[in-house]
Amino acid sequence: MKRRPRLLDLFCCGGGASAGYHAAGFDVTGVDIEPQPYYPFPFIQADALTVDLSGYDVIAASPPCQRFCKATPADRRDDHPDLVDPIRQRLRDAVARGDAFAYVIENVPGAPLEDPIKICGDSLRLGVRRHRLFESNLDLYGTPCHHDRSAPSVPVYGSYNQRPGRKPLDGDTSPLTFTTDEAREAMGIDWLPWPYLTQAIPPPFTMWLGVQLLGHARHRAKVRKVTEPAGKTRELAGQTSLDMGFSAALPSPEGDESPELRASVTTRTCRCGNQLIRPDTGRWPRHCSHACRQAAYRDRTKRSAA
């Protein structure tokens, strides 16, 4: 049975980033040094600086951001560790060994990422602005900033709700209190309580990146097919130990139909029968809700085990 490409998500916390990579087409495993009772995918409790990185196609990491975050008082930033450099070295070493073909590191603006791209929640039409930076060994594309929504962005940070008059962060403009449900809707996350939401990455951010990662993998597979002599089974330079299974498992683009036919499709249904809603970004979702996405994942896991 063909498998989906595998992604290891270090510092996974509640799984916001993991959900986006999963929606893009990856089987995701999370790693965190603390127990994560709300994490929705297979989970390993371990130190990201020592956990085994072999067996995955892509490794993503979101090291702690408090040292670089604007919300952290300047005189307390040295109280928080800087794990960006050591985790970058681990991931680059893993790619050089062939344990993975790509890595992605996420952090807040101001973090010492190398040649990062930026993703803006406003541009993805979320209820939060929540600018985040991403570094990778591959060429990935971020989003321009389109802060043109009529409604103010929701500031999902701090303690439960917000204190009126609190100084906004990251361009957020709403000084009003709001509920956890409103914060969940703004983030595109429906399974996490408030403290986890404040630290989470909206899934559309990493789905945006995950689709690009799969595109890179398809290109690599095509190049190998052209350059590898017939009948040869040797590994090419830069090919990971998992490339054979990875390239065979890559989800194909949305059908083989022509662009004109794809454009004519105006409705689609989820596996449960509910109608899917196509977002402004133009890409059809695979499932109507997080619950349906998890049910599909459990079904695939059962079939694989059988």
Image (spheres, helix red, strand yellow):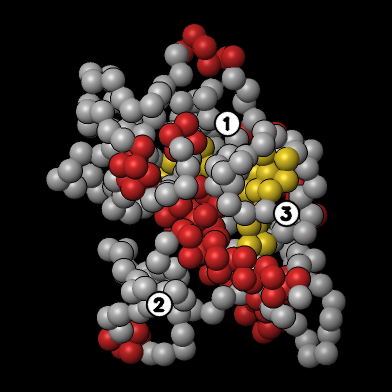
Label at residue 273? 2
Kind of element beneath mark 2 = loop
**Mark 1 or 3, closer to the camera:** 1
**Foreground: 22 or 68?**
22
Amino acid at circle 3: Val
N-terminal of the two: label 1 or label 2?
1
> In the visual, does 88 lie left or right of 69?
right
In percent of width and height, residue 251 lies at 56, 75
Residue beneath disc 1: 64
Residue beneath disc 3: 95
Kind of element beneath mark 3 = helix
In percent of width and height, residue 65 lies at 53, 30
Distance from the alpha carbon under mark 1 to that under mark 2: 40 Å
Q: Is residue 141 visible?
A: no
Amino acid at circle 1: Pro
> In the visual, does 112 lie left or right of 10?
left
Q: Residue 278, located in which quarter of the rendered image?
A: bottom left
Residue 282 in the image: above or below residue 227: above
In percent of width and height, residue 200 lies at 48, 40
Q: Quadrant of the N terminus?
A: bottom right
Q: Can residue 107 be seen in this view?
A: yes
